Amino acid sequence: MNLSGMSFILLPLMIFIIVIVIRDIVPFLRTRMSGLLTWKRSFICAGLYVGILVLMVPMLYVLPNEGFIKVSTNSNQANTLYQNVLNDLFNPDDNFPLDFYQQEGLYKNSSKTFKAETNKLAFNSDPNTNLPRIFVERKAVDDGEINVSTYAGTQSVGGIDITKLIVPPAMSFNKGTLSFPSNNQQVLNLKKFNPDFTVDQFKNGISESMNSSSWHFGFGQVIYIRVPKSLEIDTGAYSHQIQMISGKQVSE
Amino acid sequence: MSVIQCVDLTKAYGKLKAIDHLTFDIDENKITGLIGRNGSGKTTLLKMISGYLIPTKGELKVFSKKPFNSLEVSANSILIDDTMTFSDSLTLVDILKEMAPFYANWNSGLALGLFDYYSFNPKQAHSNLSKGSKSTFNSILGIASRCPLTIFDEPTIGMDSAVRKDFYRALLKDYLEYPRTIILSSHMLSELEGILEDILLINEGTKRLHLPALELKELAVGLRGNAEVVLSFVEGKEIIYQENFAQGSLYVVIRRGLIQQHIDQIKQSGVEVSPVSTDDLCVYLTSKTKGGIDDVFKRS
Amino acid sequence: MSSKEVSLLSISFKQYYYKLKAHTDLLNRLLLTQVFALIFSLLGTGGTGTSGQLSVTFKTYSANIVIVFSILWIIIVAVLLTTRPYKQLETPLVGNRLTGNLSDFGFLMTASVFAGITSTFGGVLLRNVMYFISDRSTMAVDGFYLTFTDLMYGMVVAILVLVLVSLIFYFLGLLVQANKVFAILIPVVILGTLRVYTHLGQSVLEFYMVNVSLPLFALKVIITAMILFGISMLVSNRMEVNQ
């Protein structure tokens, strides 16, 4: 994880350019254009400028609040949750069966059902991609259906919960083989508005969490497969990624 | 009543004295010419009168107040010189409008009338004007402001002769209609003679003389003739200026009063008696040498 | 002609109105600066991080750049006002050192208010623009909508900061004009003091910039401003107008 601070070089450079503009180029332009920029015209320009800016304020309040992400104010809680999920997932205990459907800290981001034509299940993935952890559970019946769900662990960046934005892994099922072709790298451009430093000083408590740029990357995604009772499973080369679990009987 | 009172005024920059023990009074409602060579201290004096510089020693009072940093002196006086600057965001017409609130006696009609007469482009900026146009515009400001004390420092720089004539004419006309105290500093005394009432001649920071213009005209005479003859008449008397010409001829300038008694004698002896123009007289009175520049050539 | 009584205040006001018109070149520079700053602000500041299949760019947006550039602008303006070309503009008018100072202060106050308002509202403009041109599904709603109180707070603080900074630099500019020695002396003294008392700079900044309440900050600024007014007027009162 690398945080490149482009602003470190960019800001002094911008300051330098602005100072040059103010001191040298503008007077030069003025001598070319003097007589054109009378005080009346300058005032009109300034008036228009202020007018537009003032109109921006009611406009901001009128803009409908839709389409945004919320900042998770309980990022610490989310952090604890997924730590717990981590533990639970990788150290399942019969006393504490894992219930994927109601587990907090996990978010189901895709669900597919495949017909188990052959009664086998094999796995395949692109050699360049890391196969996510797979948990397989046998259903009580032989309904010939393989239910595959993918779950993403809680992830947040700068306080923004991005769990729901993560693209689930692509998968396809063909002739008894569940394939995971390589995903293109997903790029997320997150944006956040901070209060200006002028207001910031008065809001010390609240702004701390708002301005945090902490990055909580979760463990990625997990796949939960529910298979018919008598399906043959061939873990192949991925046996360390695949874990059999015996979940309790729950209805979808 | 004296508008300007100056007693033993000195302005020194380090060891250099721009004004050196200057004493004079200027009365109300007169046009005075401030005459002197370059570097004689004219501008320094005018700046002190206008309140821009502080005297080093001595006393200076304008309208009975010390002019430096004085709001009242500033409100009742105006200094027109070639260093007046205006922002480029103001057009010439804007300037005329902006000056009005500051000067109580400002006459807009006169200002605009003169402005149109000189065919200025109303939308132009002050810094774009040529030297002569600038002087012309500044002169409008000086006349239209109708300040009780109006000072012009070399107002005709760059003006062509037609414009100069117009300036003097306009100044005089408005002065007669609305009297005020005016000081004009210039080199071109010959042109100014027509409108000046008094002349204050300064040299090297001190007063050389302060007389009404008419008196100055009659102050000196020039004697030209045979060197020996001329010298015999002026022997022992203070000579203002002398110049040798070809064939033993000599030209001498001397105060009329000193030889007034012998004037007929002088004329009869074949010496030519001629008046001396105020212009020339001021040059002679402020020259460093008794001879002229020709001496330089004679020596070589 | 007899002399007329003139009041300091009325002349100062007249000079102030004159300067508002005469210094529109400075106003134009502010508009240009702020437009540049707004464009830069659209780039946002932040960094990138990668984890496995996920690459996240996290950018934050605010009007900070616009405010800082406006502060730089007013520093330049404050110093320029003390320099010869700008002081010369006063000579055709009626006035003395005091009216010149008062009208300059008036101008700086007006400039501060204008720049404070426009730079703070620039943040609003930023938000509005981003709303339309950017993908909102990756935009956090917190901090997007500004309460009116916050906006006013920000505006007032920005104005106060600009006032304070402009007066400080106006005073410094006057010192340099009074005696060129200060041009070297001031940076040397400041850097020297900061080196010896390294925390001084930080404590001064904290004194002004870290406040619990707005009225307290306003009070600090007003008192400092009055002190600076006073000594500026004292310094310039003895200065000649040299051309």
Image (cartoon, rainbow, N blue to C red):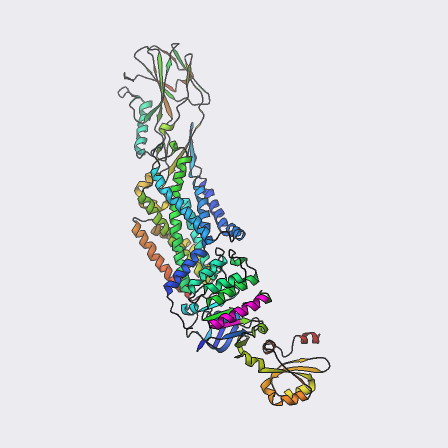
Provide residue A10's location: percent of width, then percent of height: 47, 42
Q: Which residue lies furthest to the right in this view?
A: B247
Q: Decide whether residue B179 is among the magenta residues.
A: yes
Residue B143 position within the rendered picture, expressed as x and y whole percent measured from the top left: 49, 67
- Residue at the extreme left of the image, as rendered: A95
Q: Is the magenta stretch mostly helix, strand or loop?
A: helix
* Residue placed most toward the observer, B249 or A45: A45
> Can residue B138 be seen here?
yes
* Quarter in which the C terminus of chain A is drawn: top left
Q: In this view, does A32 lie to the left or right of C28?
A: right
Instruction: Check the image and report above or below for C2 versus A4.
Output: below
Tell me where the magenta segment starts and ends, as one range: B162-184
C146 or A133, which is in the foreground? C146
Q: Residue at x 50, y 77 (%)?
A: B22
Q: Is residue A219 magenta?
A: no
Measured along the vertical axis of the image, is residue C166 above or below residue C49? below
Residue B75 in the image, given as x and y percentages of width and height: 42, 67
A168 vs A133, nearest the viewer: A168
Horizontal side of B281 relative to A140 (left or right) equals right
For the N terminus of chain A, the quadrant is top left
Q: Is residue B17 above or below residue A226?
A: below
Foreground residue among B150 and C65:
B150
